[in-house]
Amino acid sequence: MPKNANVFLRYGPYESCWTVDYRINRLKGLIQMLTKNGHKVELHQLPYMNVVELWVKGERVFTCKITDLNFGGDGELDELCHEAVEKVQNAF
């Protein structure tokens, strides 16, 4: 996949501090890694609990639990962020 791909990052709510809500704190590293690699990221909320999906050209290329992503940070130390970026780079 060439750089400058449109990546749809779809995410659901998750529980934190005894409340369930849509939060992007765990997505910041992933977003930063994708944009650093030249991709445009669009966020879309899903009704499904605790899920993250990356879509490129109508194909889901990566999925994981949102709580498995590191909280905050730049994503450099998060193995899931590296895996997600690789999946986007290899999408066709």
Image (tube, rainbow, N blue to C red):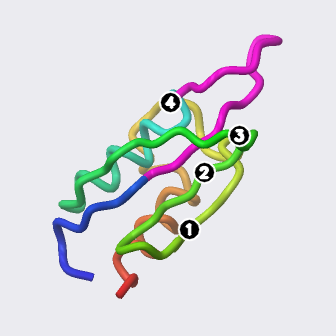
Q: Does the stretch in magenta take in 86?
A: no
Which sits earlier in the primary sequence, circle 2 or circle 1?
A: 2
Q: Nearer the viewer, residue 77 or 92?
A: 92
Percent of width and height locating residue 85: 41, 66
State which quarter of the image contains the N terminus. Answer: bottom left
Disc number placed over residue 62 in the picture, else none: 1
Give the secondary structure at mark 1.
Answer: strand
Give the secondary structure at mark 3.
Answer: helix
Q: Residues within 10 Å of mark 3 (few under 14, many from 20)?
A: some
When the figure is inspected, residue 89 is found, relative to residue 81, above or below; the finding is below
Give the residue drawn at x 51%, y 49%: 10
Q: Nearer the viewer, residue 43 or 15?
A: 43
Give the residue drawn at x 68%, y 48%: 51
Tag 4 near tag 2, CB within 8 Å:
no
Give the secondary structure at mark 4.
Answer: loop
State which quarter of the image contains the C terminus. Answer: bottom left
Residue beneath disc 2 = 52
Tag 2 near tag 1, CB within 8 Å:
yes
- Mark 4–mark 2 Cα distance, whole angstroms, equals 11 Å
- Mark 2–mark 1 Cα distance, whole angstroms, equals 8 Å
Disc number placed over residue 24 in the picture, else none: 4
- Mark 4–mark 3 Cα distance, whole angstroms, equals 11 Å
Q: Residues within 10 Å of mark 2 (few under 14, many from 20)?
A: many
Residue beneath disc 3 = 67
- Which quarter of the figure has residue 28? top left
- Mark 1–mark 4 Cα distance, whole angstroms, equals 17 Å
Mark 3 is on which residue type? Thr
What kind of secondary structure does the magenta stretch mostly adopt? strand
Mark 4 is on which residue type? Ile
